[in-house]
Image (tube, helix red, strand yellow):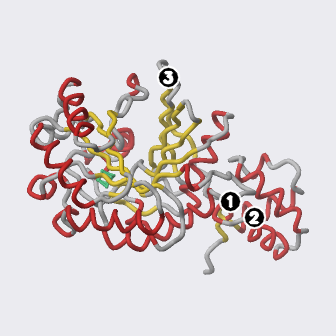
Amino acid sequence: MAEKADLLGMTLDETKTFAKEMGEAAFRGQQLYGWMQKGVPIEEMTNLPAAFRKKLQTECTYRLPRILQKQVSQIDGTIKYLMGMLDGECVESVFMRYAHGNTVCVSCQAGCRMGCAFCASTLRGRSRDLTASEILGQVAVIGRDTGERIGGVVMMGIGEPLDNYDNTVRFLHLVSQKEGLNIGLRHISVSTCGLVPKIYQLAQEGLAVTLSVSLHACHDSVRDRLMPINRTYPIESLLEACQQYFDKTGRRVSFEYTLISGENDSIEDAAALAARLRRTIHGPCHVNLILLNPVRETAFAAPGRERAKEFCAYLEKRGISATIRRKLGSDIDASCGQLRLNHVENANPKYK
Ligand code: SF4
């Protein structure tokens, strides 16, 4: 049986062509596209003829996620969502307010198969990739729910974007469409744990997104343990790929470094990190230091704030731009992936 058309995965031109194929005028496609970008369900697309809406409901797939759960921070307005997909899979998305505008953090896979030792998202592996439309749908639904303009996106939720490469690239095209959500590529960050060949591939796409590399260690022996991907692509090869990304795109690479007590947070670690970055990266880069958000299923702990400050000051002294990431929503503080994990475990008691 032919696959149903994926409405939210279409550009404006594709939606207009599709409307014509369904026997409607092109402007109906334009109306449909406008509604979809606002995260509106088909039954509420009031200016479309009822017969057309019915046809869309029966003959197409509209992968708009459903909000299953929502936690709102009373401190800074951060909102964490558990989003349900049509087939019952669920992921997390976050709405964050910054001085420079609102940003949404999206998930790109249901679960993750990368196996990082400190991460809740990977504890049950990966169920499946999300489609580009499901990733876009998270932004559209949050725009509707908050009623606010979204100016930036970070692909830092559940999943590894470069392990779902084609859908990630398609999403980047869709979300930056002028006629649609119109989020500039310069306001989008794509995170990766270090899939080196895909970094080279992304550098060729001509997309001016920021690459945000989850580094988390400066010695291969430690990174091998924390992030299994390092056994295939060790730190030096990862940093060389980052340099190539900068050379091709001119975009500053940012490194995420989660401080884990006794694992990677000593001043010797800071010295080794500074030395490596200075040796390999010739261009602007920035280190975001993050205090670990402990996952109850693991034994890792965060160091104290003072240690983070010393680590940061050391990097700066060595000429490496670094900041300690401000914690948003500390009253809704579950680590990324924990909300989904709880949901999956409650739905399947055998996992408990
Ligand atoms: S940190 Fe990212 S890449 Fe690693 S397991 Fe978690 S979601 Fe996957």
Quadrant containing the N terminus is bottom right
Residue 63 placed where, x, y %?
Answer: 61, 57
Q: What residue do we see at 20% from left, 47% from top?
A: 274
Do the residues bearing badges 3 and 2 touch, measured as CB atoms within 8 Å? Answer: no
- Determine which residue is flagged by label 3: 76
Circle 3 sits in a helix, a strand or a loop, which is it?
loop
- Determine which residue is flagged by label 2: 12
Circle 1 sits in a helix, a strand or a loop, which is it?
loop
Residue 102 placed where, x, y %?
Answer: 58, 36
Q: What residue do we see at 40% from left, 65% from top?
A: 245
Q: What's the residue type where badge 1 is placed?
A: Gln
Q: Nearer the viewer, residue 38 or 148?
A: 148
Q: What residue do we see at 12% from left, 37% from top?
A: 267
Sequence-first tag of 3 and 2: 2
Residue 92 placed where, x, y %?
Answer: 45, 44
Q: CA distance from mark 2 to mark 1?
A: 8 Å
Circle 2 sits in a helix, a strand or a loop, which is it?
helix
Q: What's the residue type where badge 2 is placed?
A: Leu
Q: CA distance from mark 3 to mark 2?
A: 35 Å
- Determine which residue is flagged by label 1: 177
Residue 280 placed where, x, y %?
Answer: 25, 61
